[in-house]
Image (cartoon, coloured by chain):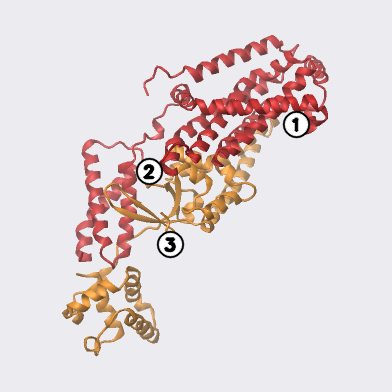
Amino acid sequence: MIVDMPKFIERESPYWRELEGMLDSLNGKRVLDLEEVERLHYLYDRAASSLTRLATFTSERRTYRYLEALVARAYGEVHTTTEPVGKVRAVFWFLTIFPQTFRRWRRAFHVSCLVTAVGMVFGGIALAVDAAAKPVLLPFEHLQGRPSERVRMEEEAGSTYDVMGNSKASFSAQLMTHNTKVSIMTMSSGVLYGLGTIVLLFYNGIILGAVCIDYILDGQIVFLLAWLMPHGVIEIPAILIAGQAGLVIGSAMVGWGSREPLGVRMRKIVPDAATLIGGVAVMLVWAGLIEACMSQYHAPVLPYSVKIFFGVVELVGLVYLLNWSGKQVVK
Amino acid sequence: MRDGKTHQLRIETPEGIEFSMTLGGPAVRAVSWAIDVGFLMAMQVGLVMVAVSFFGWAQDLLGAVMALGTFVLWFGYFVLLEWLWKGRTIGKRMMKLRVIDASGLRLRFSQVLIRNMVRVLDAAPLLGMVGGLSCWLSPRCQRFGDLVAGTVVVRYAEESEPELARLDSDKYNSLREHSNLVVRLRDSISPQEAGYFLGALLGRAGYGDAERIELFRFLVEYLRESVDLPESVTYGMSDEKLIHNIVDILFHA
């Protein structure tokens, strides 16, 4: 097709500039009325048509590239149908979107629980049959001694001074950031076809199982529950949900039973993975606060019954949130 | 698809329009990342100074602000900037890179979030080696974060309209009298070559006389290798005039 370039540019450039201005003003935030939407479509079609005409004309590449970039921008605006992020309300998102997403991928959560449980059994048995392996299974200094000795020291210390002293805020912040990083890593490792997530969940399970068996065998079940439950009933499920997100990513990578290409499969699960990891972050902020302000205080300062009761209340609340919250809202 | 030589991402719209974008390769992305890390380090120093001046009296609070501030800074920087600046950070702006949806649609917040969450894996074990290797091996130059989020990093440049008015196209062009030659020229000369000829004409004032003669002599010799230019048509025409007339034919119907 032969095009007289100067005349062509002279005739079409006002439309291109109008489209460019419209795209600049949109910026993903402004909502267009029907008339503007029609105009946007018209300008997009016109620019796309110009691009096609220029594609057959060999000489003018600068205009062609300019139009390509313009059509690419307009294409993104015209064909994208997602809601702008600013419209999502935080409370509604946490109480409705997050639990709905969790339920949509319940099977991945069950797998996450199963892998962690297998790790716990492995860690528990390993510690029970080989106590000498404790430094390897539990590479944390404060868990190296006998649990009963720790309980005695914590209770004695608690009755004489504030064990957390003036470090609640920094301890809490460190817990939040550390656990969030672990969760992000657990989710991200799902890109290795889910195997990375499984390894990390299994490793977490080993540590958890070894700690539990260590305290149970030493007769410190009540202390264990009172120590772990206030923060653990939120923190452990948070890690499991991060694992769930990782497994969702892993399953999309593998693509069992799907004929869709990888890009399409990932496109479908990315919003859900983002929602899950967002929910995990909120849960870990709460768990970090509770661990610094409550979990580290023991009897006689804070009776074990109170701590266990608090943990049970939290657990019931979490189970309700994940299983029933947002059910009545039509998707 | 990424073209094997030019690293082009080609997108075909439902309307049948095809457009392409140049993908950002591992090297240019590494430079962009290094710039961002430099800015982050500077901001980290700023954070320490602000935190100490405001919370220096309370060690506990200072520790909390530093831990949370550092975490938010290193994770939030990429998420916030890529979201607000439509796929660009400071480093990407400087290197003229942009993150876009792999199918050309508008970048969604969930994509920005996930591609930056997976950065922890891409950064392992040191200096983004996993991500760099993944980017190098991937047909679309995608690191793991891009693969999961369905994004690609493309190079962009501000394109402007051509300066054809400076070509004096109203003057008589004897080549136009040979319609067969006109068709041959349009068929044989690639867009890239046409761009070179146009560039040489627009920039000719910047050369000395000898350089100018040499440049256009070289271009004509180059042209004669692919297009048959009969002596009877070009007789008496300087190399510069010949290139001028050919460009006129290519750019004006």
Label 3 to label 1: alpha-carbon separation: 51 Å
> SS for tag 2?
loop
The chain under label 1 reads: A
Q: Name the outermost residue toward the front.
A: A257
- Tag 2 residue: B106
**Quadrant of the image containing the C terminus of chain B:** bottom left
The answer to whether dots 1 and 2 both sit on one chain is no
Q: Position of residue A69 (x, y in %)?
A: 34, 54
The chain under label 2 reads: B
User: Residue A105, can we see it?
Assistant: yes
Name the N-terminal-most of marks 2 and 3.
3
Q: Colour of chain A?
A: red
For discs 2 and 3, the disc positioned in front in the rendered view: 3
**Quadrant of the image containing the N terminus of chain B:** bottom left
The chain that appears orange in the image is B
B117 to the left or right of B6: right
Dot 3: within a 10 Å radius of its alpha carbon, few (fewer than 14), some, or many (20 or more) residues?
Answer: few
Above-or-below relation of A91 to A262: above
- Tag 3 residue: B6
Q: Nearer the viewer, residue A245 or B220?
A: A245
Q: Position of residue B63 (x, y in %)?
A: 67, 33
User: Residue A210, can we see it?
Assistant: no
Dot 2: within a 10 Å radius of its alpha carbon, few (fewer than 14), some, or many (20 or more) residues?
Answer: many
- Tag 1 residue: A137
Quarter assignment of residue B213: bottom left
Amino acid at circle 3: Thr
Amino acid at circle 2: Arg
Q: Name which residue lies at 35% across and 78% down.
A: B204
